[in-house]
Image (tube, grey):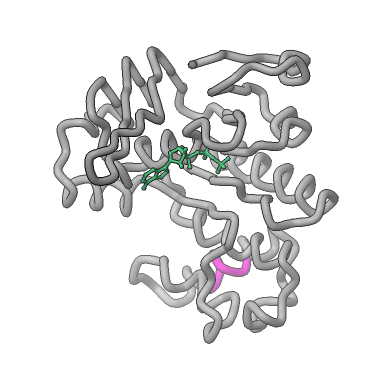
Amino acid sequence: MILVQNLRKTYRIKAEELPVLDVPSFHVEQGEQVAIIGPSGSGKSTLLHLIGGVLSADSGQLLVNGQDLTKMNERERDHFRSTQIGYIFQDFHLIPSLTAEENVRLVLPKGDAQTQKKLLQEWFGRVGLEKRRTHRPTELSRGEQQRVAMIRSLINQPRLVLADEPTGSLDWETAQQMMSLMLTLCREENLTLLCVTHDLPLAKQFPRIVQIGEINQTMHASRKEVAIR
Ligand SMILES: Nc1ncnc2c1ncn2[C@@H]1O[C@H](COP(=O)(O)OP(=O)(O)OP(=O)(O)O)[C@@H](O)[C@H]1O
């Protein structure tokens, strides 16, 4: 599903070079749910952006769904991302002038109206928002907004879901509920999930934790870990 070997990324600002990521080896199976933890600036988001085809690597191998992203040009990576990746962000990225349902409808492929209606009913029901479908984002709580964003990212069943600090702007209790909901939905749909978080207690909800950057003692207490740098 995901195979990374000797992957390197350096940012360049004018003449200055800033190496931010060096991943010797990293492997994720189809349907796995992996939390990526590490201190601020350790390259978690950069790794996610490389795997999602937003950024290109400087060297190394990066295979996702059997496709070699290091050999793709920008256009091919755009196509890869729009057809195979579901992104969940910290800031939801909902369109304020549209209702919750209209925000999700935007990503649905053209099709039979009845089938679409049923699908939307089903997904809004699954996240407990049946009665909020006609609300605009400003008329929803932050947790509700994230649930709408989750439906939008998952409804087309992308092969790979990438979540970048999806609970970062939520209070602790809501964050726990959101993480648990995201894990349940991905498990039910057999979607592969990679989730960046700096929050170890939230990461511990995942069956597997991968750590990048400095190792700290608290992190060692987790169930399953692989240090990749
Ligand atoms: N476009 C860019 N140009 C130059 N440097 C960048 C760029 N994006 C990120 N960086 C630098 O690369 C490093 C890794 O950034 P990244 O966002 O991947 O870290 P992170 O682990 O996700 O951090 P955080 O937990 O704070 O979000 C940081 O030091 C950051 O300053």
Q: Which residues are magenta?
A: 117-122
Residue drawn where x is 38% and y is 21% of the image: 22
Q: Quadrant of residue 47?
A: top left
Please state if 178 lies on the left or on the right of 82 as rendered: right
Q: Is residue 32 above or below residue 101?
A: above
State the residue lying farthest toward the right: 173
> 165 or 69: which is nearer to us?
165
Residue drawn where x is 63% and y is 15% of the image: 225
Prevailing secondary structure class for the magenta stretch in the rendered image: helix
Residue 190 rendering spot, x and y as whole percentages: 53, 36
Residue drawn where x is 63% and y is 77% of the image: 137
Task: State the quadrant of the N terminus.
Answer: top left
Q: Quadrant of residue 5?
A: top left
Residue drawn where x is 75% and y is 71% of the image: 141
Q: Is residue 184 above or below residue 214?
A: below
State the residue lying farthest toward the front: 15
> 93 or 187: which is nearer to us?
93
Task: Tell me, yes or no, whether the highlighted magenta stretch contains residue 102.
Answer: no
> 114 or 144: which is nearer to us?
144
Q: Is residue 126 above or below residue 121?
A: above
Residue 115 rendering spot, x and y as whole percentages: 47, 69
Please state if 162 lies on the left or on the right of 187 as rendered: left
Residue 227 rendering spot, x and y as whole percentages: 55, 14
